[in-house]
Image: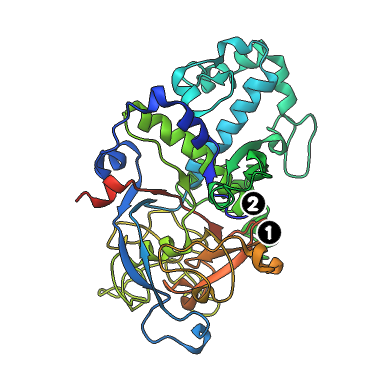
Amino acid sequence: MKNSIKYLVIATVLISSCSVLDKLNSGQDYRSIVAIIPGQVFVPAGAYELGSGKDPNVFEQFSQGKVISVGAFFIDANEVTNDEYRQFVNWVRDSIAITNFVVNKEEFLVKTKLDLALNNEPRLINWAAADMNRLLWTKPARKKNPRLDEMFYKQNHLFNRKGDLDTRILKYAYTTFDYNEAFKNIDNLAKSINDYTFRDTVSVYPDTTVWVKDFDNPTNDMLLKEYFSNPKFGKYPVVGVTWKQAKAFTVWKTQIVNRRLISAKIKPVQVRLPSEAEWEYAARGGQKGMNYPWGNELNSLKGCLMANYKVAPGNYVADGGLFTKPAKSYLPNNYGIYNMSGNVAEWTENYYTASPQGIVGNLNPILLGLEANNNLQDVEKRVVKGGSWRDAPYFIRNASRTFEHQDIPRSYIGFRTVMTASLEQSIKK
């Protein structure tokens, strides 16, 4: 993957669509976005000591504290849930159905000014007209569009019955543009836009087999079959998603969020994964030098456990959960953010190195571009923060960090998203 791929190609379209976007109000208060985009928490700008905590132990000798300044941003109040991620999966499903399998595309594909401001495709799906439950997946719709049957299994498979949706076809193609690298090479006339454009196609359906791949447990068969598909787990954090799938989700969510913001005459934003520095800053909730989002002790003042983790060797149930729990379990931290410790560990944007403090700067650093440093063995590793339901107390500390390869899904890794606040929003009280 190319270095530092951070911004959507959608942004280039927005720049060229001045007639629509010049009318947007750049001075909106941050409370407007919180009101329009549900589930967002505003985190004010500030500074903190990355990697700090009470009673550091010998294992943290390569992760000593460093003061970091972070700009204001919005962050999801909870981990992305199965319900939220399923909206992405269904959007991909319906897009594929409309563009590839529906007989009469004209009733779904249109041109609108708003769509053209967000995407330069000549014809776009009119989601208001394409009421999916009514027009695509009912029996009359299937009869009207017999080609939809091509999206379903024709015979029984190991985990799928005849007539189930073939999730292997659910792939999301997207494009990002590396402004960072482009600006660094602005005087290099030998390079073109294509040199800074990254295209990827990602299978979006979660890998539900992680429940049996990660652990041997009789309960895991049920989780494999039901954790993502059964509505009773809708409020639980999505797992089995790779870093690349989480990244693709942020590209999709950017478009969805910006439709709402532009309609409200608010400037568009970029939804992304948090940097390691942002994640830890948000987890600390404005407190200094604390081990956990709520303080230094694993228990609250009333003796209640404050997170979902492995309380003692072999003891997964003392905290009230055998595996994950709903994404808004336990008390939030001082910023109002849930489960920054435990439940599921979370992907961040950063590449992983054993000791980033000596490499990165002090202003919301994001460690990218390791290829240039010849650290090729680390390029596919991404920083994971927060610990999970299967981790010991050490790993749910604010300062703790680990990694996973960006193409490997786990039953204990999920994610949440952030949006950078504008300068006007950063300084408003």
Q: What residue is rendered at 61% in x and 60% in y?
A: 369
Q: Which residue is mark 2?
A: 224
Q: Is residue 75 above or below residue 314?
A: above
Q: What residue is rendered at 65% in x and 68% in y?
A: 373
Q: Quadrant of residue 335?
A: bottom left
Residue 17 at least partly seen: yes
Could you say which is closer to the camera, residue 350 or residue 292? 350
Q: Is residue 174 left or right of residue 82?
A: right
Q: Tell me the colour scheme of the image.
A: rainbow
Disc 2: CA contacts within 10 A as few (<14), some (14-19) or many (>=20) = some
Q: Earlier in the sequence, mark 1 or mark 2?
A: 1
The three-letter code of the residue at mark 2 reads: Leu
Residue 419 coordinates in the image, percent (x, y) = 41, 47
Q: Is residue 167 above or below residue 305?
A: above
The three-letter code of the residue at mark 1 reads: Val
Residue 227 coordinates in the image, percent (x, y) = 57, 49
Mark number, residue 212? 1
Question: Mark 2 falls on what kind of element?
Answer: helix
- Whether pointer 1 and pointer 2 mark residues with C-beta atoms closer than 8 Å, the reply is yes
Q: Is residue 134 left or right of residue 329?
A: right
Disc 1: CA contacts within 10 A as few (<14), some (14-19) or many (>=20) = some
Residue 181 coordinates in the image, percent (x, y) = 58, 51
Question: Mark 1 falls on what kind of element?
Answer: helix
Could you say which is closer to the camera, residue 234 or residue 407? 407
Q: What residue is rendered at 62% in x and 30% in y?
A: 93
